[in-house]
Structure formats: structure tokens, C-alpha cells
Image (cartoon, helix red, strand yellow):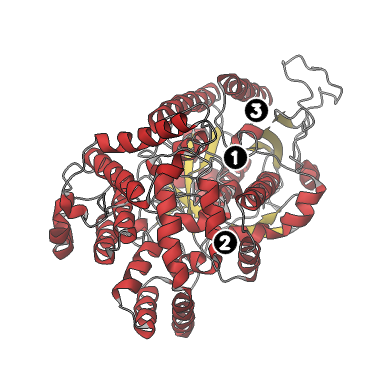
Amino acid sequence: MWVALAPEVRDAPALRETSMNSKKIRTVFMISALSLSALAAARCQPSSNASGGNGSQGASGGAAEDSGVASIEDAAVASAADAGASASPWASLSMDDLRRMVREHAVSKLREHAPTLDVAQLAAYTANPSSAPELSGKAVDEVIHLALVALTAGNAREAADWVALARARARNRNSAFVANVIFAEAKRQLAGEDNAAQERALTELFVAMPLVRFQAATVAYQLYQRREQLDARLGTIRRAMVSPETAASVLSTDGVLGSMLRGRDRYMAAIAAARTQFESRPARAPYAFSTVNLAQDRRAQPVHVAVWDTGTNPELFRAQMFVNAREQANGRDDDNNNLVDDISGVASDPDASSTGLLYNPGADTITRYGGYLRGVMDLRAGMASTPAAQQVLALVRTIETPAAQEELDTRLDAIGEWAHGTHVAGIMLAGVPQARLSVFRSAWAGEARVYHHRGPTDAELDAEDRNAADIVRYINAHGVKVVNASLGFSIEYLEDELRHETDRYRTDAEVRARALAVQARRKALWSRVFRECPNTLFVLAAGNSNQDVIEYDVVAASVTDANNLLVVGAVDRYGDWALFTNSNPERVRVFDHGVEVDSVIPSGERVPLSGTSMASPNVANLAAKMLAVNPRLTPQQLITFIHDTGAPIAAPFNGRIAHEERAIARARRGR
């Protein structure tokens, strides 16, 4: 579900602070992606440029040997094996070992992603940034890793220069403020020992940001207040196998966040000073999103739509639920379509006790953690100063053990799985009473609960295929015209979970091989779904990692052989790209409101949530309205009309913001 907050952030490999980047974005574009500790970590985690050994050699020391990464990792695994199954491979690794592993891996990957970038030329690039090549998203990840290594090795100047280079040369201009925590900590250290000088340096850095960037940048500084919090996070990280990614997580947590914590009073003073300056500036006018309500349109026709998610509460939409009159709730296939009890949708969950269209995490979880939902999403949107966000931050600051961290993450994931689809459905049905809703609940689409700290087995992937086939059968049997799928699958998140299977995988190469195989199967699944439902428009959320969906192969947004697929990115209240939105100039051409979008959750309360999960149903809602006024429109016409009537987003970004009035007017004309 693409509403996530932290596992995107969770252990983000590069702590790309431009949104909640993270190579660890949960496959759902939702809260699951939110592991709160990950949230802050992502903002701080880098990949590194400190040299190995005693850390005295910086990136300018030349390229590292490719064999070094495997040798350190394999040596740790072998050492643990020699010592017995109970020994942790982390015990034999020093911080210098971790820096060397991260740096060597970063240098190696830069040869792949930015072959013309010479890591020995940092000084020249700093003097003339335009002399450096343009950097793809994955190249930016590795440059930030170099900054991480440099900073934790005591070279703040080099760290700041690497971050500045990434910001200047990132192809994705949403990365213009990447790695704020690393950059801020480097600037603080460069200011010297005087506290006032450090505060001034940080304030200067903060006020130079746009307001929304500043708000996002404050999360880590407010989240961590005690060393016990970092130790709990480190304990969680070290439960996974040793790899360049987990090594980077340790460096960012222990090295960067640990150093930041020691200077936290200066950060908080600078945040207060910067906030005062922001408050004195003229308020920016919000973007005027175009909306149309068809409630009074007597000529509008019924249109069958569906939400494919992790569960939706049908009771809240009873007046608009599609009902298959030929099917009864009796455990039999009354209409002989090979689907049992498909009255208003299809549900799939490996938990035999959870067969409804809405996932129920239990009254205790809902009561104790449901109230944190808005705060989690505020944090996801970079709004750390709201009362709801502050409530969540206060909760997280009580975590002092890995077990407590795990418990909190699990409970918040469950709340996300419970709330997400209902919120999406509320957006999709607004202003279109002619819509009739079906619900497709796929527990596997959320991953966090079903595949907790592991990857799916081949048998479970077979079950995913069968569930998708059932949904395809339902779509075609009942004439579903628009399907919103605010979900997606990131290979980086999958790898992160696979690394917990230390009894199955010994090296990161094995993890990568399995992740690629799983991702290929899922991509084939979604390609088949789109192909077998040619008369249905699928509207997908792009994702919340500030990544290029093609470069990072975000499934299903990266499927390129479907002409009935519309991938949607998110803009904020000002019409700017949301900090977190995924993108690609060819695949993500339509954007809509995705920050603080008001809708309903299963309890009946209304809560504003943020994510591309919220932007996507806004566009699906528009498509439903267009079909209501012109049922003859094809998926291809819907895509063309929505894009062509959209309002162009100003450079340096791209894409168009959906414009309901113009799109519906064109739909009425039919050309």
C-alpha cells in the first residue's frame, strides 16, 4: 500500500532525506512502509565514502577492490559458523570493517550506475559541480553512502561535499535536498566546538530549505532523545544478516544519529529559530484542485469500480456496494463462475479465520494504536510539528529494546492494513454516487504481516497467482471498469526482509538472486492481469520512495506492456511534487493531490492521510466520473483525456495534475 511511512524509511540505505526514501520501502504504499525507527533512519542513512582501515583515507584514495565486499561479509559469516550457530556475525566486525564494506560496495556500484564518475575527483567536482556526470537515483544512493562513510570516519568536509554533489547532480530534482541528517551533522561538526556557531550553521541550513523540506527534516531530531532508542534500533538491525545495506544501517544509526544525539540541543534550538523565520514569511497560496460532483447529474450512468487493496469496510459504503444477485453467502459457487460467495468482491488471506473484505487486527490493536494513524501519515508527509505527529513521536521515544521496537512496528503495520483500503475507497467514491463498488482484498499485497521478516515461498507465490486469477475472473464476469490499486512491490524492501532469513541465505548475493526471482514472478502476474482485462482501466499508485519506478523496477508501476495502466504520482497542497512521490517521465505522467487527503477509515472517523495511495484514487475517481457521463470510453481514451487535460507541473519537475472539469467536459464530447 503506498501510504507508508517508514520502512520506506526503515533502514533506508541512503537515508535520502528528500522524502522518506529508502530502499526499504514496504511494498504497500501505506503505513506499513512506516516503521517509525526506519523513518528517521532513512533520513540519515547513507552508503559511504570513508575509506577502510582506520578511516583516514577518504574517497579520494582511489577505487576499492571489488573483492573486498564479499571478503568481509563472507568472513563474518564463516566466523559465526566456526564459533557455532549461536554466535552473531556482527560480533567480529568493527566500525572500520563496516565502513570498508559500505565504501567498497558503493564504489563498485558507482562503476555500474555512474561509470564516468571518478571518486578520486571529489575536489574538482566540488569546485565545479557541472563537471560531474548527471546522477541516476541509484548513483545518488551510493554517493550518499560515500558521505555516510566519510562522516562516520570523522571527515565532515568530505561528507558535506559528497552530499552537495548528489544534490547538485541528481537527475531527479526531488532529490535536491537529499540526506538532510548527514548534511546537517557534517555542517554542525564543521562549525567547530562553539555551540552558538553550531546553532547558527544549522539554522542557516534549515532556513535555506523550502518549508515542506524543513518540516520533513525535523523528524529525526525530534524522534531520538536517548541512547536507549538507538540501541534498540541497532539490536533490530543486527538480527538480520551482515550485508552492505545492513552495515550502512548500523553506521547511520550508531555513527550519524549517535553523533546527532550528542548535539541535539543545538538542533532543537536551530529548529525553533528556523520555524520562527518561516512563520514570519508570507503564507503561500494553496493549489486550486479541480473537483466535480455528479450528485445532481441525472443523465450520469452507473459505473462499476473496484478497490484492490488489503481490505475495505463495505458497511461504510453499503449504499454504493455492487451486489452479485446470483450469489448467496452460503459457502457455495451459486453462479458457477468458479468463485465462492463473490457477492461484492474477492478476499484472500492465509489466515483461515480472516475471510472478510476487511482485515480485523483485533479490538486491542485498534483501540491502542488506531489513534496514531494520522500522526504516522503526517510524519510520512514530512509534517513533524503537527499535534498528531508529536503524539506518535512521543510514543516512539519510549522504545528502548529491540522487542519493544518490533512490537510497535507490528502493531502500526496492522493498523495500516486495517485502514488503508477503506480510506482509498472513500476517496474513489466521492462525488460519484453512480459508482458501484467491489472490493478485492489481497492480504499478500501488504506483505508486512503475511511475510514478516521473510520472503514468500514458491507455494505462496502460487497462491498469489491464484488470487489474482480469481480477481481477473470477477472483473470480466461483472464488468468492472476502473480498478484502483494503491499497492506495489519494491525489490529493496523484499531484500531487507529476506536478510532476516539467516538460516536460509548466507550472502547478499543469495538474497539478491531470490529477490529478483520473486520480483520477476510478481511482474509477470501483474502484466497478465492487465492483459487479461483489456476493457478495464487500472489506476496504480506510483509509490512513496522518491524513486524512478523504471530504474528501481517498482512492480506493478514498472510494467511497460499494458495500455490500460495509469500510474499516478502525488503532489502536495501547493501543487508541487510530494517529497515522497515516485516518478518517471514516461510512466508517471499524471499526478494528483496526495498530502493530507481527507477520507474515512473503518471506524467511520475521517482522517487526512498522505501518500501516492491517496493520489491514485483521486484519479480513479475522475475516471469513474468520466465513464458515468460517457460509458463508451475505452481505457486508452480515459488515459489520454486525463493526461491531455491536466495542468502541467512547473520545471524542474514533469507531469500533469489531473483537472476534473476539463477531463469530464472532454469525456462528454467523447473526443
Instruction: Classify 182 as above or below 311.
Output: below
Q: Which residue is rendered at x = 76% and y = 56% of the image?
A: 368
Instruction: Report which residue position mark 2 lands on.
Output: 228
Instruction: Report which residue position mark 1 lands on.
Output: 627
Nearer the viewer's eye, disc 1 or disc 3?
A: 3
What quarter of the picture does the N terminus occupy? top right
State the image coordinates of residue 375 (x, y, percent, origin top left). Answer: 63, 62
Visible in this render: residue 15? no
The local crowd at label 2, few if under 14, some if 14 to 19, many if 20 or more residues have their Cα within 10 Å, is: some
Amino acid on which the number 1 mark rests in the picture: Leu
Instruction: Report which residue position mark 3 lands on.
Output: 479
Give the alpha-carbon distance from disc 2 to disc 1, as whole Å.
Answer: 55 Å
Looking at the image, the residue that sits furthest to the front is 83
In the foreground, 90 or 389: 90
State the image coordinates of residue 297 (x, y, percent, origin top left). Answer: 68, 50
Answer with mark 1 or mark 3, whichever residue precedes in sequence: 3
In the foreground, 271 or 549: 271
Amino acid on which the number 3 mark rests in the picture: Gly
Instruction: Classify 545 as above or below 522.
Output: below
Visible in this render: residue 669? yes
Circle 1 SS class: helix
State yes or no: discs 1 and 3 in contact (Cβ < 8 Å). Answer: no
